[in-house]
Amino acid sequence: MTDFPPDFLWGSGTAAHQVEGGNTNNDWWDWEHNPDSPAAAPSGDANDHWNRYEQDFALLAALGQNAHRFSLEWSRIEPAPGEFSRAALDHYARVLDCLAANSLTAFTTLFHFTVPRWFAQRGGWLAPDAVELFGRYVDRVSAALGDRMPYVCTVNEPQIVALMAHGLGSFPPGHRDIAEAATVNGLLMQAHRTATSALRAGRGKPQVGTSLQLPVVEPLDPTNQGDAARAAGLKELLVDSHLADLTAGGDVGDFVGLQYYTRLRIDSTAPSPIAPPPAGAETTQMNWEIYPSGFGESLRAAASTGLPVIVTENGIATTDDAQRIRFLESHVTELRSVMASGVDVRGYLHWTSFDNFEWSHGYHPTFGLIGIDRDNGLRRVVRPSAVAYGELARTGSLKALRGGAS
């Protein structure tokens, strides 16, 4: 007897700038090479996935996965305003065909943190016609690739883009203005709806959804009014506003993508509002608390929209692969429990397929089921967690993870 339905989607994910290499024409390339930015290292060749995607997809399929999430690099497709690259679109057509040939159901993300340099230089998401220009890009993608894309994630973590890029200054353009962050948050909700409309009008009939990171947000001290108020404000930005938008009417897509990593405890007395993990808590390389019960809370929150849920990211940065297997077991067990209670979850895409460029943290955090040996030609190193996870995908049984941890 299996723990999950036979048609459940099991896969993992990547993002173009984090794995392709050589994405020189976007805002992140500029950010990485700016000595005044917090970026730890340039992305450089990344994993050379632009050239090695065929071998990479064959490896993921051989391990037992049946789905894969990746992103399109907007700056390759539209390198200058209104100038679209046929070669780039043809490349991504081959990528999608390769996924299908390996029986990997494709989840295509349209915007995963990077924008073309020209888009950033004219004001990024704050430009008056930013959402319209995003819609034009999606129109062209849909016309070229729509019939090859079974699932599309329109915007990756809109609230994280808003907070990190415009509120905390950790992503380009490096602004620190919480009101501006709230504005961008709303604009990215509009971008999702605009993309959904463009995809409906284009080729094929892809299933469409936004991908939301929904952390558990709590006051450090529930009896402290400052903690409670600040937690409520952050929860409104990160969680509540997006759930409200998805229930406000109109075409908001066919599913909601959930991305979950941790809980945030809010301390109103500290310079940084996010308190350290509790004493004794198990943490990751990112110093995030491992909090599996929060995964269940976030799954239920996503399901409150009335849309089916697909987990589009959940994973751990760690140098201890046994810890990764324990993380998988605890979170997938929580997933099974939530599904048993009636929540409609249709897939789980682990983050990430391969160790990759972790934005301003560079290459230090290792999230991958598969390692990358950067000293030996970017050799792919299959970890025990990748084998155990593949067995889970093949069998639908949590026993695969318990055996992998022994």
Image: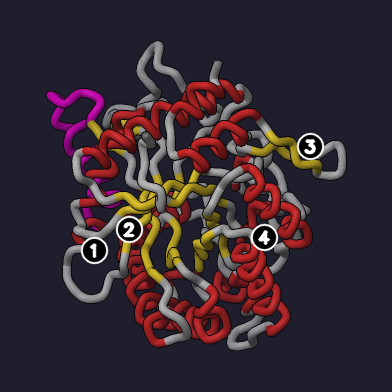
For the point 33% across and 74% down, the residue is 193
Q: In the rendered structure, which amino acid carries the disc numbered 4? A: Asp
Mark 4 → mark 2, Cα distance in angstroms: 32 Å
Residue where numbered disc 2 is placed: 256
Q: Residues within 10 Å of mark 2 (few under 14, many from 20)?
A: many
For residue 66, which numbered disc appears in the image? none
Q: Quadrant of the C terminus?
A: top right
Spatial distance from mark 4 to mark 3, Cα to Cα? Answer: 26 Å
Local packing at callout 3 (Cα closer than 10 Å; few below 14, some 14-19, many 20+) is few
Which dot marks residue 246? 1
Q: For this rendering, which residue is in front, 97 or 81?
A: 97
Element marked by disc 3: strand
Asked if the residue under mark 1 is in contact with the one under mark 2, i.e. CB atoms within 8 Å, the reply is yes
Dot 2 or dot 1: first in sequence order is: 1
Residue 98's spot in the image, x, y percent?
66, 65
Answer with the quarter of the image where residue 252 lies: bottom left
Q: Reading the chain from its start, which is encountered first: label 4 or label 2?
A: 4
